[in-house]
Image (tube, grey):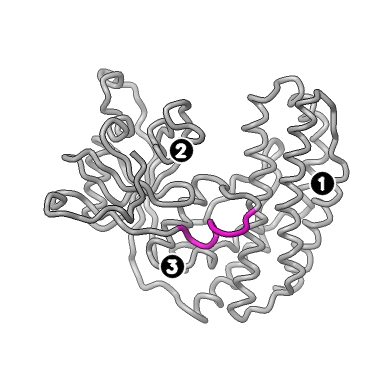
Amino acid sequence: MNTPAANFALTPDDAGAAGCLREHSSHALHQGERVWVETNCYVDVWIELLHGMGFDPRAALAFTVTQDFEGDQFTFFKFPLEDIEHLYGTQVTELAIYDSLEDRVQAQTLRGHTVLVEVDGYYLPNTRATSYRREHPKTTVGIDFIDPAGKRLGYFHNTGYHTLDDEDYDGLFRKLPQFSGQADLLFPYAEFAKRVRAPLEGEALARASAQLLRGHLARRPQRNPVTEWRATFPTQLDMLLERGERFFHPYSFNLMRQLGANFEFLSKYLLWLDAQGVVVPHEIAASAQKVASEAMVMQFRLVRAMARNRRDTCDDCFDVLEASYSDTLDPLAALMA
C-alpha cells in the first residue's frame, strides 16, 4: 500500500498509535525543474523531514561546498547534524535498539520525535519503480507515525511522505516467519530527532547560514576533486566495460549522481542565500548548476558507450566539470572571505 498521507485522517481507533499521519507536499527542492530528481536517501529524507517540521531546508545546504573525490567515489554528502541543531533547534541522537525496533520507534514517536532508521527497501512500497519486492537496498526513512495494532506506518523517504501496512510492516520490523529464530540478525542503526530549542528565523537564519558557509568553505578540498577523478577515470572505465550494466548503476550513483546532485543543491542554496539578502552573484550559482547538468551528460554518454562496448574517456565532459567547479568554489570563497 502506498497511499498519500493527505488521504488519511486520524480516527478514534488511532488512539493507541504513536505520532500522527500527516498531509505533506514535497518541498520545492523536490519539485519543478531538476536535473537530479533524487540524490541520496539521507539528504532527501532530511529535506522532507525539515520541511514537515515547518523549516526551510535550503538554509542548511552550506555543507555542499565540502564535497571531495574519495578515490573511488564522491563524498556521500549529508547534512551535518550540528548544523541542523544550530539552525533549527533540532537535536539528533543515536537511538539504542536494546529490545525490538518496533518498541523503540513507538516509544520515541509517542514523545513527538521522529526516528531515522536504516531499513530494507524491499518493503517500501513507494519504491515500486526500483527496489520494492525485487531488491534489498539499505535506505534511510524517517518514521513519525506507528500503529502496531493496525500494522501501519507513516514515514518520510526520498522525495515525500508515505505509508505502509500489513506484510510490509511486518517485513520492515523483521516479524515475518523467515526472520524467526535468527538471533544473529544485527540491529539496524537508528537515530531520533527531537526539538530542543526554538529555530532561527528570517534574517537571523540567513546570517547563521552564511556563517556556516564560511566555516565549510575553510574545509573545502584544497585541489579540484574533478581533476582527481579524471586522473583515475581511465582505470575505472576499463572496469566498467569489463563488468557491464549491473556494475554501472552503483558506479553512476556514487560518482555522477553524488557530484551532480550535490552541486545542484549548492546552486539552489546560493540562490536562496542571495534572496535572503546575502549577495551572491548569480554567475556562481549558474556554474554550480553547470556541474550538475554536465554530470548528467556524462552519465548518458557512458550509458551509450557501454551499450556499444566503446571506450569513451569523456574528455570534453571533464573539461566542463573542472572549469565549472573552479568557477563555483574559487569566487565563492573569495566572496565570503
Residue 94 appears in the figure: no
Which residue is labeled 3 in the image?
Answer: 55
The C terminus - image quarter: bottom right
Image point (76%, 61%), residue name: 287
Q: Earlier in the sequence, mark 1 or mark 3?
A: 3
As helix, strand or loop, the secondary structure at mark 2 comes to helix
Magenta stretch, main secondary structure, is: loop
Per the rendered image, the range of residues in magenta is 26-34
What percent of the width, then of the height, locates residue 293?
A: 73, 52
Q: Amino acid at mark 2?
A: Thr
Rate crowding at label 1 as few (under 14), some (14 to 19) or many (20 or more) other CA atoms within 10 Å.
some
Distance of label 2 from label 1 (alpha carbons)? 35 Å
**In the shown orientation, is residue 176 left or right of residue 199?**
left
Q: Earlier in the sequence, mark 2 or mark 1?
A: 2
Of badges 1 and 3, nearer the viewer stands 3
Distance of label 1 from label 3 (alpha carbons)? 36 Å
**In the shown orientation, is residue 121 left or right of residue 23?**
right
What percent of the width, then of the height, locates residue 42?
A: 49, 47
* Vertical order, 68 against 313 (above or below): below
Q: Earlier in the sequence, mark 3 or mark 2?
A: 3
Distance of label 3 from label 2 (alpha carbons)? 26 Å
Whether the magenta-drawn stretch holds residue 36 is answered as no
Rate crowding at label 3 as few (under 14), some (14 to 19) or many (20 or more) other CA atoms within 10 Å.
some
Which residue is labeled 2 in the image?
Answer: 127
Image point (55%, 45%), residue name: 40
As helix, strand or loop, the secondary structure at mark 1 comes to helix
Which residue is labeled 1 in the image?
Answer: 227
Image point (68%, 49%), residue name: 260
